[in-house]
Amino acid sequence: MHDDSRLTEWEQRAALPLAVGSLLFLGGYAVRVLGDGLPGPWRDLCLAVTGTMWALFVLDYVVRWRLSGQGAAFVRRHWLDTLVVVLPLLRPVRVVKTYEAVQRRHGRPRLALHLRVIVYAGLSVSLLGFAGALSVYHQEHTAPNATITTFGDAVWWTCATLATVGYGDVAPVTPLGRIIAVGLMACGLALLGAVTGSFSSWLLQVFSREDDERPPG
Amino acid sequence: MHDDSRLTEWEQRAALPLAVGSLLFLGGYAVRVLGDGLPGPWRDLCLAVTGTMWALFVLDYVVRWRLSGQGAAFVRRHWLDTLVVVLPLLRPVRVVKTYEAVQRRHGRPRLALHLRVIVYAGLSVSLLGFAGALSVYHQEHTAPNATITTFGDAVWWTCATLATVGYGDVAPVTPLGRIIAVGLMACGLALLGAVTGSFSSWLLQVFSREDDERPPG
Amino acid sequence: MHDDSRLTEWEQRAALPLAVGSLLFLGGYAVRVLGDGLPGPWRDLCLAVTGTMWALFVLDYVVRWRLSGQGAAFVRRHWLDTLVVVLPLLRPVRVVKTYEAVQRRHGRPRLALHLRVIVYAGLSVSLLGFAGALSVYHQEHTAPNATITTFGDAVWWTCATLATVGYGDVAPVTPLGRIIAVGLMACGLALLGAVTGSFSSWLLQVFSREDDERPPG
Amino acid sequence: MHDDSRLTEWEQRAALPLAVGSLLFLGGYAVRVLGDGLPGPWRDLCLAVTGTMWALFVLDYVVRWRLSGQGAAFVRRHWLDTLVVVLPLLRPVRVVKTYEAVQRRHGRPRLALHLRVIVYAGLSVSLLGFAGALSVYHQEHTAPNATITTFGDAVWWTCATLATVGYGDVAPVTPLGRIIAVGLMACGLALLGAVTGSFSSWLLQVFSREDDERPPG
């Protein structure tokens, strides 16, 4: 689309700090949601960290928008970035990408593609699942008739959702909790696709290798 | 099968009006089902719109039947069209096809095939899911012992069904509601197939590209 | 394994009668299970039909065993046939195979492989699902604390199981009902594999065709 | 990584005894968990067998560590072995690998790759499912508000989980039971991937064969 050297430079420089910021955001949110018994100042600190990181994400988005030299089209073309600015809990997933870039820069040997897909899908789904469990717990645990009343319940429910098992012994009852749940179901479908697709393509590779080794007939 | 120029011409001309009609049908049905508090005349208007559109679909079917010059074989060969005439709520899915045709005529660049499959599967499933949630809500919300009592419940249940998660905290209890549910499950299986299949073939493409780039060994 | 012409001849001649017998067996069992209000003689007739057909299956198995000239090895090599003799409700699935053979002999054009896989998977799963729903209903509807109390419940539960959705609003409670349920789950997994696999390979074919048509680059 | 002949020799020699030991471990654990009514000495014997086998696994791990000549890196490189030493209930899965090696040494004809994947996935999942059902039953049956109160319930729940059906009529309620459940869900996802992947690649092979046989056009 655009080969601005300044934009590329910004993105490379900002990647690592933003990855750290994403984890700080997630950590701050987690402590804020789970730390009911924490003294007030600590809770305020968490809120401040979370807010500052969000502000950083917005700043990064604005800088990239200006450097790109695109107008309103930037919002549409980079709709995933736009979404992440609005829902910063999705941000930590980009850590996986940054982690890979750092690994490559240090010359670490890359895993086989099948393993990489499984590992990255697993990491992304874990981060999304943790963020999802946090926010579902945040929404649900004070709702009337809620079945998800502890964070353990939320994690258990998240795992059952991501594996598309869905026991239904605990399930969200609030509208916002259910919207987050639908997002997690989509992640579960994608995870299933990643696992199945890796398996399928790995099998096909093994087949074609066996076909090559074996005399025809 | 048949290369009647008149049939092709009819189909091309009717595509856009019918697509608009499909959305009107869905909208009218939605207002009719959800608008319990609407004044009588509005409800009658919705019923009229829905009925008129259905009549249009039947008209289109009859015209195409006559133009095709086929006898009773038309019903069997175009069984999908026949089904759609009987169950017009399935019709809006064809909007996806029309939308693609319009995009192509305007020379918009097409998405990569993987993305297209995901996008079209997502759009079709959303439309079918909306129609399914509407009709399940329509059937269920007045049934005794129903667990799906609000439209929000119906949408939530539809999402859990399409992702094959199936919590079972709410579930249809009427025979007709369950028949619609089985149709939605089939959509869910197809969606799963589309997501998994896209992922799997995308991975295989990436593999074969890597194999080409890399020196063998 | 063995190219006995007499065995092949027997198998070809017996295929159609046995297919009809399988459907009679399923029909007789269905009337027997569902027809609680039927007069006694009709119920006895159904029992007689079911029993006779089972005897026919055993006869066919014994004839093929003798013609094959294999000893005890026949039981192991043809373990699927052995299983079907013990659980004759699985037999109707072979109707799908016979139907295909008849279609081919009459020179009907074959469907594309993807469609055939979907159609045959759908037919097999429908027959197995019907047999499964019947036998689960048979086991469950008189059990204490049963949730599957009508045949409609059994069919609904079977559909939710085959689609791997599993609401759990109704579920078998007897040991034998649960064993049948596990068999249906396995069918559901296979159905999912068939749908996903067909989709995936269809997509890959479309890709490779597009690659051929399009100039490289 | 390392081609120590002594390590390879040890691994070849230890494979069969360790496979037998794994099954003894599983059997001893099963009797211990299920045999509530057994007299004390028998229960002590089971505990002794289980403990001895675990000690053997640790011994094998230590010997291989020393023979490998690697330091702490061994723990990371062989993380799967490390995991199995900590959670010896996972060990029986290796029996499948040993069984294959024995079959090959005896010159038995190997199954087609698709069948092998299905058979090995089925065997592994059965062993893991049995171990999972045992340990979930062990954790749950004495917990307050438990729904899994008999071993039959545990097996039923395990099957519903592995097929990703998840009725939720019975479900674990203790933290440890839920952690085991998450592991079983992961197995279920992998099983789904194996079934779907085998189907998908088998279909693709059949397609390419048909393409070869049929004249183009």
Image (cartoon, coloured by chain):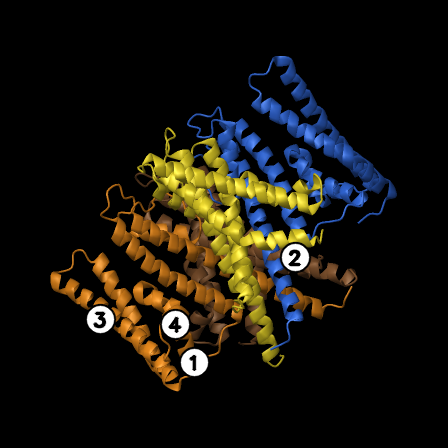
Chain colours: A blue, B brown, C orange, D yellow
Q: Could you classify mark 2 by the number of other residues whose Cα lies within 10 Å: few (under 14), some (14-19), or many (20 or more)?
A: many
Disc 3 or disc 1, which is closer to the eye? Answer: 1
**Amino acid type, mark 3:** Thr
Residue of label 3:
C52
Residue carrying label 1 = C2
**Callout 3: helix, strand or loop?**
helix
Query: In the picture provided, is C129 more to the left or to the right than A157?
Result: left
Mark nearest the camera among 1 and 4 is 4
Look at the numbered discs 3 and 2 and tell me whether their residues touch, using CB distance below 8 Å: no
What residue would you read off at disc 2?
A: B202
Look at the numbered discs 4 and 2 and tell me whether their residues touch, using CB distance below 8 Å. no
User: Horizontal and vertical percent for residue A44?
Assistant: 65, 17
Residue corresponding to mark 4: C73
Work out how far the residue at label 3 is from the one at label 1, CA to CA, in angstroms: 30 Å
> For this rendering, which residue is in front, D144 or D132?
D132
- Mark nearer the viewer, 4 or 2: 4
* Occupied quadrant, residue C93: bottom left
Residue at point 39% right, 82% down? C8
